[in-house]
Image (cartoon, rainbow, N blue to C red):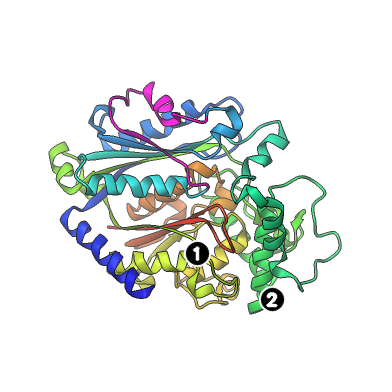
């Protein structure tokens, strides 16, 4: 496995040297619940902002990758989503690729846009993710997640994943009587397994959530902007032990877009290179069969190793991270996978404040999925938006000082005992 990873990374690194790729523009809508906005509305808003930020017009786009996960389920638009969403804003007559990879859809689309440009298919490319998830029909809304695993034996899969933490006692009254996504039971299973294996505590998970809610107070695009303390998180309404409501990502609507360009394209299009952010690595992996306790072969850890090798960097070189905290336990697991702390130390490091802005390695300065919001098909490019903003020094009160290199981790679906897919992206000045 290790030598194969090195070979793959070496090939990708060679391609990067032949053709450097840059993010030249980003745009993002607010994330939240918007009954009066359509997929088209939010796509147009995000893409228009990204094009304006890049200083290019729609007719200079050579290809587009449109990411969305649940529009088919929510609206019955199962096909040609990107062609429909983009046509009205003049993006037509070019390759438009529709991307669905569960919650990793947008980062997958971003990766495909990078590869499109590396292959010499054009100078300038668009990656956009958009999602309309909120509905007054709560059964429809929560069932959107039901196909994020093998539907042929969904009940058995859910039971097996939820049982990962068997042996950790669930206090009385720690389960919500209200409906919620079945994935919260899965994350609770991961959380209890982590608690059982490493001694992680509910307070440590609450510290992650409190930190992210504090960060989002300074993000004008975040769904929730009220800071919370650890105690407030612990005493919030329960979802399923050890998770309380603020530890879980909400249902969200929103869109995010990025304009990417080759190095030669920067010159040909006369763009401002001083604000261009280099894509130093973009890795996509699928999961593998492994025992749940084999954390060292978690797909995100393997993707991170590939990404660091491709970029010629290590975890110690990262100034900032955006990770997939669909729940607080997700952030604890992912900062371990990215190599910021040893396995089992994610909880204590979070409680010590190492991952807050001003800490050793700021994580989710945007507020993360828990607080910024999680419109699943847009989330990965929402992470890119934050990291580009940070690397440009334009994040205002949530700015991480001296940010030079940044990493994003975005996972999607579940297969076996881990995500079905994961993307790790490294950006830098």
Q: Measuring 38% from the left and 65% from the top, which residue is drawn there?
A: 319
For numbered disc 1, what is the local secondary structure? Answer: loop
Residue 98 part of the magenta-drawn span: yes
Compared to residue 301, the image places residue 150 above or below, namely above
Instruction: Name the side, left or right, on which 157 lies relative to 331.
Output: right
> Circle 2: is it few (<14), some (14-19), or many (20+) Cα within 10 Å?
some
Q: Is 5 on the left-hand or right-hand side of 67?
A: left
Q: Position of residue 207 (x, y in %)?
A: 63, 65
The disc label shown at residue 70, or none: none
Q: Does the magenta run of residues contain 307?
A: no
Where's residue 254, x and y in %?
A: 52, 37
Pointer 1 residue = 288
Q: Earlier in the sequence, mark 2 or mark 1?
A: 2
Residues rendered magenta in the picture: 78-102
Is residue 225 visible to the viewer in this orientation of the structure?
yes
Q: Out of 332 and 154, give the one closest to the viewer.
A: 154
> According to the image, label 2 marks what residue?
196
Tell which tag, 2 or 1, sits nearer the viewer: 1
């Amino acid at each position: 496995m290790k030598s194969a990873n090195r070979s793959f990374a070496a090939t990708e690194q060679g391609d990067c040297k032949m053709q450097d790729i840059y993010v030249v523009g980003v745009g993002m809508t607010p994330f939240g619940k918007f009954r009066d906005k359509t997929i088209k509305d939010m796509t147009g808003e995000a893409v228009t902002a990204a094009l304006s930020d890049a200083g290019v017009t729609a007719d200079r786009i050579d290809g587009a990758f449109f990411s969305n996960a649940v529009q088919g389920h929510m609206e019955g638009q199962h096909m040609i989503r990107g062609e429909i969403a983009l046509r009205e804003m003049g993006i037509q007559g070019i390759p438009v690729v529709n991307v669905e990879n569960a919650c990793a859809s947008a980062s997958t689309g971003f990766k495909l846009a990078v590869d499109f440009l590396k292959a010499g298919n054009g100078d300038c490319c668009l990656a956009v993710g958009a999602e309309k998830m909120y509905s007054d029909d709560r059964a429809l809304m929560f069932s959107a997640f039901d196909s994020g695993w093998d539907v042929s034996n969904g009940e058995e899969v859910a039971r097996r994943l939820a049982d990962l933490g068997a042996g950790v006692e669930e206090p009385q009254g720690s389960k919500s009587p209200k409906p919620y996504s079945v994935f919260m039971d899965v994350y609770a299973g991961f959380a209890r397994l982590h608690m059982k294996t490493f001694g992680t505590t509910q307070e440590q998970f609450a510290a992650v959530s409190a930190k992210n809610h504090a960060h989002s107070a300074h993000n004008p695009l975040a769904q929730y902007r009220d800071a919370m303390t650890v105690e407030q998180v612990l005493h919030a309404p329960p979802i399923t032990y050890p998770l309380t409501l603020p530890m879980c990502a909400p249902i969200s609507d929103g869109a995010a877009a990025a304009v990417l360009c080759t190095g030669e394209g920067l010159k040909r299009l006369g763009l401002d290179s001083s604000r261009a952010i280099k894509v130093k690595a973009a890795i996509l992996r699928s999961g593998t069969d492994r025992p749940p306790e084999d954390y060292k072969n978690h797909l995100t850890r393997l993707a991170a190793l590939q990404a660091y090798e491709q970029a010629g960097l290590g975890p110690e070189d990262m100034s900032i991270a955006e990770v997939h905290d669909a729940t607080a336990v997700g952030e604890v697991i992912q900062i371990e996978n990215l190599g910021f702390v040893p396995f089992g130390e994610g909880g204590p490091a979070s409680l010590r404040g190492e991952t807050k802005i001003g800490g050793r390695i700021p994580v989710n300065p945007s507020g993360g999925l828990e607080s910024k919001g999680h419109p699943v098909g847009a989330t990965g490019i929402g992470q890119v938006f934050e990291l580009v903003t940070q690397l440009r020094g334009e994040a205002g009160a949530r700015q991480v000082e001296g940010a030079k290199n940044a990493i994003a981790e975005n996972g999607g679906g579940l297969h076996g005992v881990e995500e079905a897919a994961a993307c790790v992206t490294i950006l830098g000045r």
